[in-house]
Image: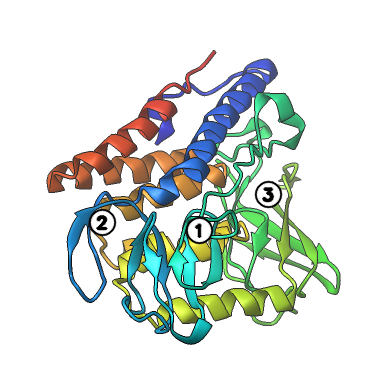
Amino acid sequence: MLNHFISKPTDGLEKKVFRLTVTAIASIILFFNESSVLAQRQSIVKRDSLDSLERKCDFIARIVDDNDLNWRAGSKLCEGDKLRVANGSTVKILCYLNLKFLDLPSGSISNAPDKCVPQAVKRRCTFATQNKCPKTKGPGDENDTPTIISPYGSSILKPRPVISWYPVAGADNYTVIVEGNGVRWETEVKTTTLPYPKEQRELQYGNAYKITVIANIGNSPLNADPSVVNLLPKRDVEQILEKVKRISSLNLPPDEAAFLDLDTVYMSRRLLNETINTLKQRVAAGSQNPTLYRTLGDRYLEAWLPEEARREYTMAAQLAQSRGSLDELEKVQERLKLLKSVQQP
């Protein structure tokens, strides 16, 4: 838990400064992720072409079809790698640098602006644009409101998301309200996790919905802290699912598919809820891959959940150290140092 590093704020001014400090740290991590991490998931790789040559490089893309004469579907590519296609056709690749599926002709995969090159880094939240910064989620917020944890992020893919929130000390039960276009329901539960009720109408594609959780202590309901989520339009959902299906057809190692390819697909639309749940499934399956835990920590931080991020970074550091993965350990330690710098002002 981040409480090891952070003293809990006690008044309004301290809480405001606390939020802004965590926001700044999250911004730094986000900038680091978007500008370099996607290209540096692994350092020493085996070339997946038919000649089976080994070399050092950073993966920047993956072949996802069988149209290339030298590279198999599923092969990972490095900067400057060349495609060889017959009869003027193209090869489909997934570019980790710009989060896009690209159809490329013969030639280098990275020698033109419209090929596999880094996307422009967008600083979504900084001290200069504080009005655009979402509130940091965390237990023990002011008024002890039941701050919503999931759905993670503001965009979702599925019309029946799981709703969860931080518990409130002394709460007897919680009232959950979901409302928006074509949907309005309310239910009372004693737990802090609610699978979307089967008897309720599901969320409608292309619409925004407000989720409110109220903590009830005796006869005194506490002020709620609502969250707004946007369900993607159906056409966009179908496109994402088609890309997921294409990745699944490659029969990649499950951990690698989760933290590299599926994460790339989901993050192309800022679908934190989908990638976090996918990574959590691999954790539940017993993954011992430090990169997977680091990536999950990054996504938690982007969902404004610093405590959860630190937990995953700590596990990633332990696994990287036990495996002797010095490159991965260095990346995780950089993140832990940033989190440690978040202290009570």
Residue 116's disc number: 1
Q: Above or below — where is 340 with respect to 62?
A: above
Residue at the disc numbered 3: 216
Q: Nearer the viewer, residue 130 or 211?
A: 130
Q: Residue at (33%, 51%) from the top-left corner?
A: 58
Q: Quick check: 316 left or right of 324?
A: right
Q: Real-space Cα distance between discs 3 and 2?
A: 41 Å
Residue 131's disc number: none
Tell me the crowding category of disc 1: few under 14, some 14 to 19, or many 20 or more residues within 10 angstroms, Cα based.
many
* Residue 265 x %, y %: 53, 65
Tell me the crowding category of disc 3: few under 14, some 14 to 19, or many 20 or more residues within 10 angstroms, Cα based.
many
Could you say which quadrant of the image residue 170 lies in?
Answer: top right
Q: Residue at (39%, 56%) from the top-left corner?
A: 80
* Residues at circles 3 and 2 in contact by the CB criterion of under 8 Å: no
Residue 274 seen by the camera? no
Q: Earlier in the sequence, mark 3 or mark 1?
A: 1
Q: Above or below — where is 114 with respect to 71?
A: above
